[in-house]
Amino acid sequence: MANRRLLVKRLKAVRNIRKITRTMELIATSRFKKAMDRATEAAAYTKKISEIVGDLGRANLKFSHPLLEKHATEKKGILLILTSNRGLCGGYNAGVLRLALAHYRELKGKNVECSIEVSGKRGAKFLAFQKVPVAASYMGFDTPQFADVDQLATRFISQYIAGEIDRLDIAYTRFESSSRQTAVVESLLPLSSLGGVPAAAAKSSVDYEFLPSAQEILEEIVPAAFRAKLFKCFLDAAVSEQIARMVAMKGATENADEMAGSLKQQYNRARQAAITSELAEIIGGAAALG
Amino acid sequence: MADLRIVLVTPEKTLFDCPVTSIRVPMFDGSAGFYPGRAPLVGRLGVGELRFAEVGGTSQSYFIEGGFVQVQGPQVSVLTNAARPVSELSRKEASAALATAQASRPKNDAEAALKRKNLERIRKMQALATRD
């Protein structure tokens, strides 16, 4: 029966695909571990920065910095979208892009001229397909390096201070826990908070000596806090991507298993049916002769 | 004797976390040394050499580029954008970087300031690389 041969072929195909998805799952798992390690190591820096900010907070200082101030009118903005370079990671890119586009339209409605910058091939392709103008796209953030992110951050900072942009938003997937990541749009500039002030304030207060002065340290630490925040977004996105891929590939492997099982069953039935009909033919033939 | 501990942190990772006997950091206006029992301090760092003597007697030095230092009790935290062991710096690389930096032609004040800063940074790196 032709049907049987077809079933064998499909079964082989499904098994091959299962091998691929299983391997991809394992690769994603190991990459996730690496990305996770990077993210945890980077957390130490952010923690220290917010500690120093907390120390500054007790020095009776007025927090004023161009990056903290909201511009009087909002005319121009940048929306940075972090997507992945590779596909096969479930709803990871779709989630971010859906939110980002909604935010883009909202800003447009408010007459804010918004230019989109996108990281990752998937996002760039999607936006090109949707015919949304993209000002810049970056492809090199599979494993984000601080030096690269720093360049971006420096440009954003100088643009914001010069008044070329009035706001900076970022759409990315925030890593909350290894079982929970959500796509979010966050506003990075003007910098709303430097983070961690109350936690640091709870500690016993230490009387610090500030060199050169608390004010000058503040001027340096605000950009540093912004850089760390931006870097954290990139790291979060990288971790979330690997988790999304891991989950998607796990699902695909399970589906392939299920499919292989049902195909095997169908094949066995077809085989048995063929045997039975052959037997029936022989018996029928023998009976006719006798 | 009160002890001293150095924590060297970059945005990418914690490079060092160990007890030491003394630390020398490049502040914005020159070198500063810390011994056990230093009063609490928060300071801005410049570009230059971070050097610390480990308990065993060996000393290590890193080339760091700006950042902050926080002294809190026995713990000295050094936060910096980039840190490289001085032994990894090469003369060739430093002079190549210097040549590229010198070749740039700034078009406005901001770029000129950036170039000056960059040159200063590379010269310091070169000085460290050629020291020994």
Image (tube, coloured by chain):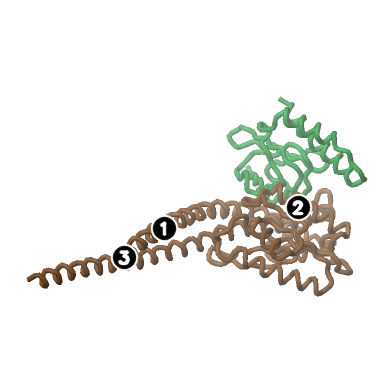
Position of the N terminus of chain A, as image quadrant, is bottom left
Marked residue chain, label 1:
A
| Residue at the front extreme, as displayed | A289
Viewer-side residue, A97 vs B66: A97
1 or 3: tag closer to the N-terminus: 1
Q: Nearer the viewer, mark 3 or mark 2?
A: 3
Q: Residue at x 41, y 60 (%)?
A: A14
Do the residues at pointers 2 and 1 share their chain? yes
The residue wearing badge 1 is: A13
Q: Residue at x 61, y 32 (%)?
A: B58
Apparent colour of chain B: green
CA neighbours of label 3 inside 10 A, class few (<14), some (14 to 19), many (20+): some
Residue B10 in sight from this viewpoint: yes
Marked residue chain, label 3:
A
Mark number for residue A267? 3
Number of marks in the rendered image: 3
The residue wearing badge 2 is: A152
* In the image: residue A106, left or right of residue B102: left
Viewer-side residue, A14 vs B1: A14
Apparent colour of chain A: brown
Where does the image place residue A125, in percent across and percent down from the top left?
67, 59
As measured in the structure, the alpha-carbon distance from the residue carrying label 1 to the one carrying label 3 is: 14 Å
SS at circle 3: helix
As measured in the structure, the alpha-carbon distance from the residue carrying label 3 to the one carrying label 2 is: 57 Å
Above or below, comparing residue A187 to residue A238 in the picture: below
Where does the image place residue B68, in percent across and percent down from the top left?
75, 48
CA neighbours of label 1 inside 10 A, class few (<14), some (14 to 19), many (20+): some
